Amino acid sequence: MGYTKGGVDVSITTETHEVNVDQYGDTPVNDFITSRRVQVTVPLAETTLENAIQIMPGASLVVDLEDTSKRRIEVPTASGTSMLDIAKELVLHPVTNETWEREDDFVLYKCATSGTVEFSYKHDEEKIFPVTFKGYTDDRGRLFAMGDITATA
């Protein structure tokens, strides 16, 4: 989706259920993971109509029949849209690495953005679409990977 400005942020949170027993008071004897969440926030610097369509579920491009330079996107409410149905893989790969260097890669196996975006028009700054991609578990129970996903067990 092009260039970014300001860095890409990854947030991983894990929630647990703490197990306590009477014999040890409030001291936990164990924890069980109850959920794990991941999201990636990307400040897109290429604020094109084509990119806006990709980050707005259900959006479509309208091109004038007589003058194809006249274009706009139409964005519906998209109420009831399944985010999992539109989820795709997202790979973060540092630009300082060669394409074959995948040790620093971060991969969301399935993710989507709801289309929540705030941006400003400022005379002394670029227009940026800060987009948050939310990760979903894939059909194999995987949420994300770090490193070279071509590595086999």
Image (spheres, rainbow, N blue to C red):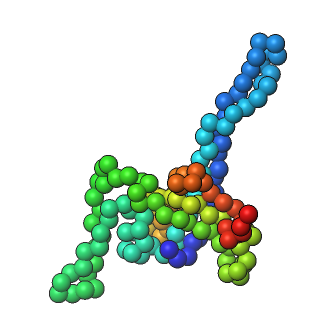
Quarter of the rendering occupied by the C terminus: bottom right
- Side (left or right) of 82 relative to 140: left
Judge left or right: residue 146 versus residue 48: right
Q: Is residue 7 in view?
A: no
> Up-down: is 108 above or below 38?
below
> Could you say where residue 101 lies in the image, as x and y percent from the top left?
73, 77
Please provide percent x and percent y for residue 78: 31, 54
- Identify the image quadrant of residue 29: top right
Q: Residue at x 59, y 47 (%)?
A: 37
Q: Residue at x 28, y 85 (%)?
A: 69
Q: Residue furthest top?
A: 22
Could one spot residue 147 in this view of the protein? Answer: yes
Question: Residue at 49% across / 64% down in the picture?
Answer: 88
Eyeballing the image, is 81 above or below 19? Answer: below
Residue farthest along the left direction in this orientation: 66
Q: Quadrant of residue 18?
A: top right
- Along the line of sight, which residue is nearer the eye, 126 or 73? 73
Residue at the extreme front of the image, as rendered: 153
Q: Is residue 29 above or below residue 72?
A: above
Numbered marks: total: 0
| Up/down of 15 relative to 48, above or below | above
114 or 47, which is in the foreground? Answer: 114
Is 89 situated left or right of 120 in this image?
right
Q: Position of residue 130 (x, y in %)?
A: 51, 62
Q: Position of residue 8 (x, y in %)?
A: 62, 64
